[in-house]
Amino acid sequence: MKDEGLENSVITLSARGWSIRRIERELGISRARIRRMLGLNSGARDTTGESPIPVKKPGTSKLDPYKKTIAEFLGKYNKATGQRVFEHLKDNGYQGGKTIVGDYLLSIRRPGSKKPVRMVETNPGQRAAHDWSDYNIKFTSGGNGMITKVTFFSYILAYSRRQYIEVVADKTQRTLMRCLINAFIYLDGVPLEIKSDNQKACVDHWESGQPVFNQEYLKFASHYRFVPLTIRPRRPVENLKVERPFYYLELSFLNARDFKNLDDFMEQLQRWLNDVNDVRIHGTTKQRPLDLHVQEHAHLQPLPNQHYDTSHVERLVVNPESCVYWKGYMYVVPPKYMFELCPVRITDDSVIIYSPQGELIATHPLAREGQKDRYIGAKQSSGKTPDLPLGDIVSRLEAMGPDMIEFIGQVKRHKTGSWRHHLRALLALKVNYRVEDILLAVRRAMDYKVFEYGNIEGFLSNNATPRYGMKLNFKPNNKDNDKDQR
């Protein structure tokens, strides 16, 4: 057995100038042994400083004959637990213990990157990163412990690590841009670069290894003068500059706290951001994020005078109730715009309706979630649907073109008692069908000399694509019925 103490004595004495003969007399060992020790030491010092790596020879295990059985079982039941795999092996004659089975499953199932992960520090004001995360939160209000899904948006300045967190209702592009604007205002500036994960709100697709950013997101980035960046698909570690943006939120805010409801939750979140998250000593920088933000602030780009318009614009048809329909609620429009296709702007708190010519015609507060009254902007005490004068109906139909003018004349000639009803119902078709399709149906009706609304609707139902995929339920006006009976 190698005597490390003896070898050390030989080497240190030789280093002090002792001769081999003197060491031989002092330690009582042969000169050949002394020379061998000194030679090995000199060789190790002169050639390499690395100790040889001992190679562990693979041993045999009782589990070895059953590894193929495990692979087949996991191929069929890939989520099987260690206990279930152990039971299956016992059924097939395995005589070993459970622990070795668990260790083997851990070795073949353990996820992990084969590449090293390194943090790269950036200059002040150079970069920020944002991300989403969902959590199930128990609210105590009412005593029933209701579990609610809560989605967080996180934005972190890479140099100072100062963070903005917001609770959001969805992960749409419009919500993302609103959150980024709120973060810019909160931190009073915009970095040169902003990195995201590979989400659809930012990236449409990849071509030749490069991201193709969404055009709307690029316009947003240009407005605030930052360069959009994103991680490559299936490379989540590329975003580690944000250092697990929700880790401290989970550890400090979501841990051991009670929340009455969502309002209480958001109030506590804001206090935590100000009183805890901003002033803690960060594990990497060893400084408070608020102090480093003072240094970084001067390097951030200033905010524009006007923020980016994140409102959503839809073109909606004014229905027979003289309303536009948006997410379960009716927003009232002046009756003269019934059946018109009107631009509607939806903001965080308002629904703004314009005429087809672009004139502002109505503004209503956006309905609150769970609001019972479906009609926004008018009293519904009478229960009667507003109506259009017959002259307006005829003029709107005639505006579709010469084919419609000719058809109106034919309807009046052949449906002397009910032509008013047919024309009202014909105009109502604009709610669900395009004018081009209606005119095609009208020309077909004249070819076959049929002048009833039902024939037009039947042709459209079978041959045209509706706007909203719904079937109209048009009811004739009582005044039309009275006139038709005369």
Image (spheres, grey):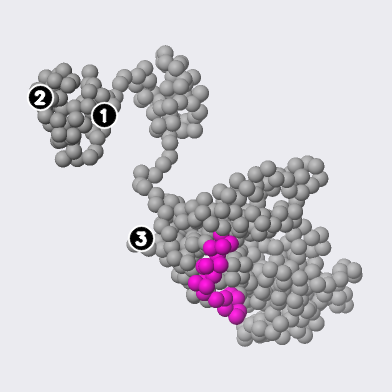
Q: Quadrant of the N terminus?
A: top left
What label sits on residue 21 in the rendered view?
Answer: 2
Instruction: Identify residue type, mark 2.
Output: Arg
330 and 136: which one is in front?
Answer: 136
**Which element type, helix, strand or loop, lies under badge 1?**
loop
Residue 296, visible in the rendered structure: yes
Work out whether mark 3 precedes mark 2 in sequence or the reverse, and give the earlier one.
Answer: 2
Q: Nearer the viewer, mark 3 or mark 1?
A: 1
**Which element type, helix, strand or loop, lies under badge 3?**
loop
Q: Is residue 112 left or right of residue 466?
A: left
Expressed as whole percent of the image width and height from the top left, the position of residue 474 reads: 75, 67
Q: Nearer the viewer, mark 1 or mark 2?
A: 2
Instruction: Identify residue type, mark 1.
Output: Val
Q: CA distance from mark 3 to mark 2?
A: 71 Å
Check the image and report above or below for 18 versus 447.
above
Q: Quadrant of residue 324?
A: bottom right
Expressed as whole percent of the image width and height from the top left, the position of residue 75 reads: 42, 32
At 44% across and 65% down in the image, what residue appears? 123
Q: Quadrant of residue 313?
A: bottom right
279 and 192: which one is in front?
Answer: 279
Q: Which residues are the magenta region?
A: 289-308
Expressed as whole percent of the image width and height from the top left, the position of residue 69 reads: 39, 23
Q: Is residue 60 left or right of residue 472?
A: left
Confirm whether the magenta stretch covers residue 306. Answer: yes
Q: CA distance from mark 1 to mark 2?
A: 38 Å
400 and 41: which one is in front?
Answer: 41
Expressed as whole percent of the image width and height from the top left, the position of residue 135 reads: 62, 48
Which residue matches tag 1? 55
Q: Are marks 3 and 1 in contact (CB under 8 Å)?
A: no
Work out whether mark 1 precedes mark 2 in sequence or the reverse, and give the earlier one.
Answer: 2
Which residue matches tag 3? 209
Q: Are marks 3 and 2 in contact (CB under 8 Å)?
A: no
